[in-house]
């Protein structure tokens, strides 16, 4: 008798590759999803169950009588899924956010310096106050519920946390904000703070391999929480300029303070701070590697967007939240250039940079700025 796998979700960007991987491993695969987003890349032999996995009253009847060797929870409410599949599977792999459960930056629990820029599996302070961040608090609650069920023997559980994903078929693809402006021939592109924000991301076709790896190594991954990311994190400016180069375009970057750089806020997902994490644990313990390097992954994403261009002003651009209001952007750039010119004319003398250690030309010579001029 063949093994069975129930994939809750499965029609998103990483779903088809996961489903195909399970079929290759000998599983009889069923996907359960709401039915709003069918994906033609799902092999025809896969059975579909249409039910809403957010609510017990819709999920429970949909899995009545089922017992699966493996359940992958990619979509829905994790706490509800845990309750419904307990006793119906020996193995549950849950997928969710990487660092969205972290407490707010101002939480004193981070210590006197504050929240570190880089968060890892072992360096995340979970949100403990529902009034401060309800979504993060609910994420903590759901993960605690998952691992409590694991400890009590309901099933063997593993949690895989993703940062923001990119790749073919990704919902609300932020990179479209750059691609469309390049296609529209925009000469300028506004970025806040020099475009220096760091945001860890993950390519959807890579993270699919992490899910399959956890399925292949149930003992090693049992009771573990792993974060899955690209191997490197780049600045927003590097990301923008690389995407533009793939399209044969060059932007003049208009550097503005965050508060004024509103056209870039959708690209930044309305987050100014760095969002950094890494995947060292899953690489060390399960041997996770990246099938696609970041440069190739971004190139593939851009190519997919060119072949599947969202309708201007349509549903996808509405999800992204970018109005592409070029007239307003041009007015902002015009005013900004004038203001920056005025600021640049304000006198401010500053010594040029100098190395802090002595570079004596004779014994006993003291430190000196050595010819550095004011600027």
Image (cartoon, grey):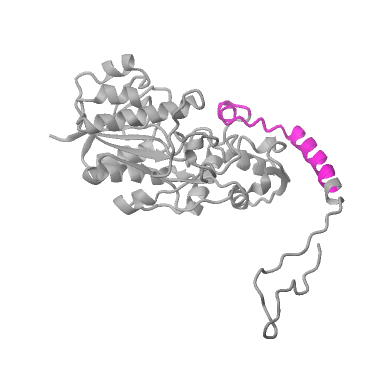
Q: Residue at x 36, y 39 (%)?
A: 160
User: Is 339 inside the magenta-drawn segment?
Assistant: yes
Picture layout, residue 67 above or below residue 343: above
User: Is 316 inside the magenta-drawn segment?
Assistant: yes
Q: Does the rendering let one see residue 163? A: yes
Q: Which residues are magenta?
A: 313-341
Relative image position of residue 338 (x, y in whole percent) = 85, 43
Q: Is residue 144 left or right of residue 251?
A: left
Q: Residue at x 34, y 19 (%)?
A: 51
Q: Residue at x 25, y 29 (%)?
A: 149
Q: Is residue 62 left or right of residue 11?
A: left
Relative image position of residue 320 (x, y in whole percent) = 58, 31
Q: Residue furthest left?
A: 1
Q: Nearest the camera: 168 or 154?
A: 154
Relative image position of residue 26 (x, y in whole percent) = 21, 40
Magenta segment's dominant SS is helix
**Quadrant where the N terminus is found in the figure:** top left
């Amino acid at each position: 008798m063949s093994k069975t796998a129930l994939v809750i979700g499965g029609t998103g960007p990483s779903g088809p590759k996961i489903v195909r991987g399970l079929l290759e491993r000998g599983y009889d695969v069923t996907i359960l999803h709401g039915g709003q987003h069918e994906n033609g890349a799902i092999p025809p032999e896969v059975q579909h169950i249409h039910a809403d996995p957010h609510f017990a009253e819709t999920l429970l009847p949909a899995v009545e009588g089922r017992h699966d060797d493996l359940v992958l929870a990619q979509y829905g409410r994790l706490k509800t899924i845990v309750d419904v599949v307990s006793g119906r599977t020996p193995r549950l792999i849950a997928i969710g956010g990487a660092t969205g459960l972290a407490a707010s930056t101002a939480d004193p629990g981070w210590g006197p310096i504050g929240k570190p820029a880089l968060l890892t599996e072992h360096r995340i302070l979970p949100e403990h106050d529902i009034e401060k961040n309800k979504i993060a608090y609910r994420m903590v609650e759901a993960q605690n519920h998952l691992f409590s069920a694991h400890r009590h023997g309901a099933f063997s559980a593993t949690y895989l946390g993703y940062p923001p994903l990119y790749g073919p078929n990704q919902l609300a693809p932020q990179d479209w904000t750059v691609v469309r402006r390049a296609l529209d021939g925009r000469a300028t592109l506004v970025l806040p703070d020099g475009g220096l924000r760091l945001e860890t991301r993950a390519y959807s076709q890579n993270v699919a391999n992490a899910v399959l790896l956890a399925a292949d190594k149930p003992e090693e991954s049992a009771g573990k929480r792993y974060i899955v990311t690209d191997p490197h994190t780049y600045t927003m400016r590097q990301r923008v300029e690389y995407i533009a180069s793939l399209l044969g375009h060059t932007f003049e970057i208009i550097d503005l303070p965050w508060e004024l750089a509103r056209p870039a806020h959708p690209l930044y997902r309305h987050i100014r701070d760095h969002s950094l994490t890494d995947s060292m644990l899953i690489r060390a313990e399960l041997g996770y590697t990246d099938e696609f390097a970041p440069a190739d992954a971004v190139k593939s994403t851009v190519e997919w967007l060119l072949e599947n261009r969202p309708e201007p002003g349509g549903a996808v651009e509405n999800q992204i939240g970018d109005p592409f209001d070029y007239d307003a952007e041009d007015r902002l750039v015009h005013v900004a250039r004038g203001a920056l010119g005025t600021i640049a004319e304000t006198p401010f003398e500053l010594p040029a940079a100098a190395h802090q250690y002595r570079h004596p030309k004779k014994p006993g010579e003291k430190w000196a700025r050595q010819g550095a001029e004011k600027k």
